[in-house]
């Protein structure tokens, strides 16, 4: 039986996907800042029992993203333990779901290419790499793909059965996916709706049932709205922050310094598409070369009907990509959700050209290269490695460490997982005008020098600024004692009250 399974293309694809996503998932420690920040927020949920308000410290909430990714990480850690494997598991499972859905979507939109589509997604470089990272982008990609699968089944599967109720059921799946995407990243999670609405508008005749059916919209509101309503009610001004800073400012400004130049979209997205789709890039380049002629051929309504699956795939890829290019906040992982239509398009192109699945020997060689890259990344020396920081602290500091305070430096929030302690970022200046939502610092140094001062805290600061911190502490009756040798150009300090001599 097992020999038959190994000779099955579907079983081989599944084994490749599982190996690429899970084999070295826990080999690399948490890397700051992004992995540490997301993991830290999830651990605060577990520690506090507050799963509604994301927190990066006891004093400061974290509102840059909705909570779905944090919920997923926290749930995984609660089940599988406090380790990097558990923290990354939601991303890996999202990758595996996208592999499966790529095949299911290709079965409807490009019949006969489903195995190539699943294999293409499973072996593309960017999806594999992203499956090893803790971000919100993979959970978002999985939710958006679930939504589009529901739409594909409603239009290309259920319609063939002539059953309106079945189509409505699949549209409910679509809206459930969009609701989860909205809980993962807010309004950007609805970008594939452009393709859904554009497709229905492009097809001749009146489409029934409509994608904007009241039942689907009601399901979306019931799933997506409660969390937003709860936190907006508890925190006045939060809605304006969500819409202003996290949506409008990211789209219309370069306030976040994310390649907002006019050429930023070329510098970020072109290499991501060319390298991230390897080894399937040649098939996609051939598709892109044929696209202008294909678009001209779609002008007659009859042609759009005959090539409806291809039209939907093109809209799913190109309309969100246009928005990402126009937006002035650009990062490679933003376009991760577009790799499912890219995989299906690559499989469809190869099918049209009469190309079957690639040779398994060649594929295994590619898998071996990718696994070697994953192992190399796990061994790569970097100051971002939170496990290295935890080891350095244990080697230098005697006694318990209740909290680690980084003074005007990047907070290594990954220590929450690797050292089991809270982490804060401190300013040496008072913070009277700090933003109410997502301020840069968790607190000021002087805020911690009160009656509740914690002597078990560890303070870390760059070597060049140690004297400045010592002077500030001295004015408040405290001194700083170095712990061992510096690490990564930082000095580790214990802060103590200065004893007052008796007269």
Image: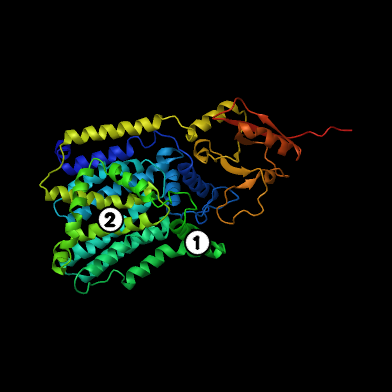
Question: Which of the labelled discs sits on residue 10, or is there none?
Answer: none
Whether residue 108 is visible here, answered yes or no, is no
Q: Quadrant of the C terminus?
A: top right
Q: Quadrant of the N terminus?
A: top left
The structure residue drawn at horizontal position 36% and vertical position 50%, both measured from the top left corner, is: 265
The location of residue 220, given as percent across then percent down, is 37, 65
Q: Which residue is mark 2?
A: 317
The structure residue drawn at horizontal position 54% and vertical position 28%, both measured from the top left corner, is: 392
The structure residue drawn at horizontal position 26% and vertical position 60%, both measured from the top left corner, is: 315
Q: CA distance from mark 2 to mark 1?
A: 27 Å
The location of residue 145, given as percent across then percent down, is 30, 55
Q: Nearer the viewer, residue 66 or 271?
A: 271
The location of residue 494, given as percent across then percent down, is 66, 33
Tell me: 290 left or right of 268: left
Is residue 304 depicted above or below 287 in this figure?
below
Q: Earlier in the sequence, mark 2 or mark 1?
A: 1
Residue furthest to the right in view is 503
Q: Which residue is mark 1?
A: 244
Residue 279 figure quarter: top left
Tell me: 154 left or right of 459: left
Badge 1, how many Cα within 10 Å: few under 14, some, many 20+? few
């Amino acid at each position: 039986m097992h020999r038959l399974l190994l000779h099955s293309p579907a079983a081989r694809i599944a084994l490749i996907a599982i190996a690429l996503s899970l084999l070295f998932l826990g080999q690399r420690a948490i890397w700051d800042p992004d992995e540490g920040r997301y993991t830290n927020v999830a651990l605060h949920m577990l520690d506090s029992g507050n799963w509604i308000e994301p927190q990066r410290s006891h004093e400061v909430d974290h509102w840059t993203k909705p909570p779905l990714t944090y919920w997923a990480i926290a749930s995984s850690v609660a089940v599988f333990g406090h380790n990097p494997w558990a923290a990354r598991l939601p991303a890996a499972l999202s990758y595996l779901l996208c592999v499966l859905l790529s095949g299911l979507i290709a079965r409807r939109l490009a019949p006969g290419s489903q195995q190539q589509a699943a294999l293409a997604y499973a072996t593309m470089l960017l999806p594999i790499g992203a499956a090893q990272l803790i971000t919100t982008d993979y959970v978002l990609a999985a939710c958006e793909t679930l939504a589009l699968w529901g739409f594909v089944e409603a239009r290309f599967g259920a319609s063939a059965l002539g059953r309106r109720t079945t189509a409505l059921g699949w549209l409910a799946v679509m809206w459930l996916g969009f609701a989860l995407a909205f809980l993962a990243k807010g309004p950007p999670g609805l970008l594939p709706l452009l393709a859904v609405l554009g497709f229905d508008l492009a097809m001749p005749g009146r489409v029934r049932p409509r994608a904007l059916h009241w039942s689907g919209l009601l399901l979306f509101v019931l799933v997506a709205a409660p969390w937003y309503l709860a936190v907006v009610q508890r925190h006045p001004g939060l809605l304006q922050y969500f819409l202003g800073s996290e949506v409008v400012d990211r789209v219309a400004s370069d306030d976040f310094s994310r390649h907002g130049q006019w050429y930023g979209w070329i510098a970020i997205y072109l290499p991501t598409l060319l390298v991230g789709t390897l080894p399937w890039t040649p098939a996609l380049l051939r598709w892109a070369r044929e696209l202008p002629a294909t678009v001209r051929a779609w002008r007659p309504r009859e042609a759009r009907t005959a090539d409806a699956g291809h039209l939907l795939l093109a809209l799913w890829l190109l309309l969100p990509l246009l928005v990402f290019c126009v937006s002035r906040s650009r990062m490679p992982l933003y376009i991760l959700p577009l790799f499912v239509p890219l995989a299906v398009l690559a499989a469809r192109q190869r099918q049209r050209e009469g190309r079957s699945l690639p040779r398994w020997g060649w594929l295994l060689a590619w898998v071996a290269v990718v696994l070697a890259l994953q192992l190399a990344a796990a061994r790569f020396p970097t100051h971002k490695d939170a496990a290295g920081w935890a080891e350095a602290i244990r080697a230098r500091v005697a006694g318990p460490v209740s909290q680690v305070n980084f003074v005007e430096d990047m907070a290594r929030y990954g220590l929450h997982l690797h050292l089991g302690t809270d982490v804060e970022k401190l300013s040496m200046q008072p913070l009277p005008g700090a933003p109410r939502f997502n301020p840069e610092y968790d607190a000021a140094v002087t805020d911690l020098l009160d009656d509740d001062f914690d002597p078990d805290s560890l303070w870390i600061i760059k070597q060049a600024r140690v004297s400045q911190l010592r002077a500030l502490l001295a004015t408040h009756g405290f001194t700083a004692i170095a712990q061992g040798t510096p690490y990564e150009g930082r000095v580790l300090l214990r802060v103590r009250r200065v004893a007052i001599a008796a007269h």
